[in-house]
Image: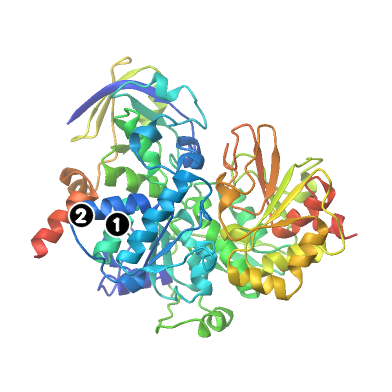
Amino acid sequence: MKLKGKVHKFGDNVNTDAIIPARYLSVSEPGELAGHCMEGIDSEFPANTEQGDIIVAGSNFGCGSSREHAPLAIKAAGISCVIARSFARIFFRNAINIGLPALECPEAVENIRAGDTVEVDLTTGKITNLAAGKTFLAEPYPDFMMEIINAGGLVEYTKKKLAKGR
Amino acid sequence: MTSAEKILAAHSGRKRVNPGEFLNVRVDLVLANDITAPLAIKEFQRLGVNKVYDPKRIVVVPDHFCPNKDLLSAEQAKLIRQFARQHNLVYFEVGRMGIEHVLLPEQGLVLPGEVVVGADSHTCTYGALAAFATGMGSTDIAVAMATGEIWMKVPPTIRFVYHGKLKKWVGGKDLILYTIGNVGVDGALYSVMEFAGEAINELPMDGRFTMANMAIEAGAKTGIFKADGKMQKYIKTRAKRSYKLYQSDDDATFAKVIEYDVSQIEPQVALPHLPSNVKPISKIGDIRIDQVVIGSCTNGRLDDLLQAAEILKGKQVHPEVRCIIIPGTQQVYLDALRRGLIETFIRAGAVVSTPTCGPCLGGHMGVLAAGERCLSTTNRNFVGRMGSPQSEVYLASPAVAAASAILGKIASPEEAVN
């Protein structure tokens, strides 16, 4: 599966309070959350994001709270994929579980700028910066995680597993 | 193996596990709160199962935006209350509830050697009880509620050893801030932080809860302590089920061993906007504050309130400061009341609130306006954490918080008592 989009670039330690401030957590509708996505660091983000855009960020992306509202808000804002130097572990789990691709690739982060157009091949982990004509390879997902991704998220994966057990 | 590895092995039917392996782990307790349970319930319903795996092992606590702060939070609280009643879950209503990570240990719901998963990042607090406890998102929690199992990757363990005797007014909060300041907010990413050393042996249980609580602030999967005599004394009167103690082997493999001499460290303060932006109190300079918060899952226990009261007794909160004190549970509140702490706080000009996470995450009971500055005993000081993105949060111990409340600026406990 291939994705293509314009890049929004962020630094290190983008935390869940920046992604979706807790004051909006009295709702869990992704569409409503999307309107406040990244409000803590870039209040123009929802307005400047188009369907399919890609976030490229530094280390420890999504640190802080366990709120699944964070990847939900990012996905509903139109982001198709997050590429980072590293992810905070709960955010990473949440992203995989809800079907928001999260790729670790330090070289890509170094060599992609805000506004670049990037193509991502989720099957091979190949990330291409179309603006610079450079290609990078993301850390491949372990087989186990690939099964969750292929199933379409943790709920679908578990449903299949439960059906088999019956 | 390390104690964390032993617990995971015992919960996945394995003799031995190694860091990096994927396991299907049996869980002993599943937790959710009023802001994470609504999503978990939605995902639970999508799973197409009609009952939870074991209602006695699923705990729901309405603590974040409760007592209901507005109409939307009231609807969320109603949703989780109905779900809890329908499935006969362990549920704590307002009046009996407290901040989840203060409440569950106090109620004997978390025991040594157990695996606990919670839809709250500070679930790692229970490592103080030598449990493997970790935060996850709502979908993971939905699956755990339905199946009693969850997938995990075995984390490597980093051992932190604290040598020496702590100075007066220096405790668990200072040790963990010092550690995060040293290793950074991703210094223990995906890892277990194992806490050991003479200073840890001397540390009271409440200080250990504070340390384990903030393991997530270094990116850790959990923080874990040894099951020593102090811990067993705490658990003995509370446990209603049997439990097992696991200790790290002498030849256990640690990813790293980090040693500190803590005999000279001062009270620590984390400056905006990262918990790793830490300085000793003597290097802080003159920072005026508008608000002080003493409470939360980090520092809302009796020892924390005792420490604050020792400093506030007979003193007055600075006229330009709002000092908000939040006992972590009804039991902590009652103990504080019986010991006269509540009167000390009220006479000093502080406000005492019913248990809630409230201000820590900018929910209610002390939200900050633009340009305001708060010294808080909570765990995060990210941009906008307690309200306006133009506000600032400084993190410190209850002793520093109480001293700062009196002096109207970030101050050392020594400065306030002398």
- Characterize the local packing of mark 2: few (<14), some (14-19) or many (20 or more) Cα atoms within 10 angstroms: many
In this view, the residue in front, B285 or A19, is A19
Q: Which residue is mark 1?
A: B142
Residue B59 location in percent, x, y?
Answer: 40, 66
Q: Is residue B349 left or right of residue A165?
A: right
Mark 2 secondary-structure assignment: loop
Q: Residue B47: which disc?
A: 2
Residue B305 location in percent, x, y?
Answer: 70, 65
| Quadrant housing residue B16 | bottom left
In this view, the residue in front, A52 or B106, is B106
Q: Chain of mark 2?
A: B
Residue B335 location in percent, x, y?
Answer: 67, 74
- Name which residue lies at 69% across and 49% down: B269
| Quadrant housing residue B294 | bottom right
**Residue B136 in sight here:** no
Residue A47 location in percent, x, y?
Answer: 41, 20
Query: In the current view of this chain or complex, which residue is farthest to the top?
Result: A131
Which quarter of the rendering shows the N terminus of chain B? bottom left
- Name which residue lies at 41% across and 24% down: A46
- Does B43 sit above or below residue B145? above
Q: Residue A130: which disc?
A: none
Mark 2–mark 1 contact, CB under 8 Å? Answer: yes
- Mark 2: amino acid: Leu
Q: Is residue B276 left or right of residue B223?
A: right
- Does A115 sit above or below residue B180? above
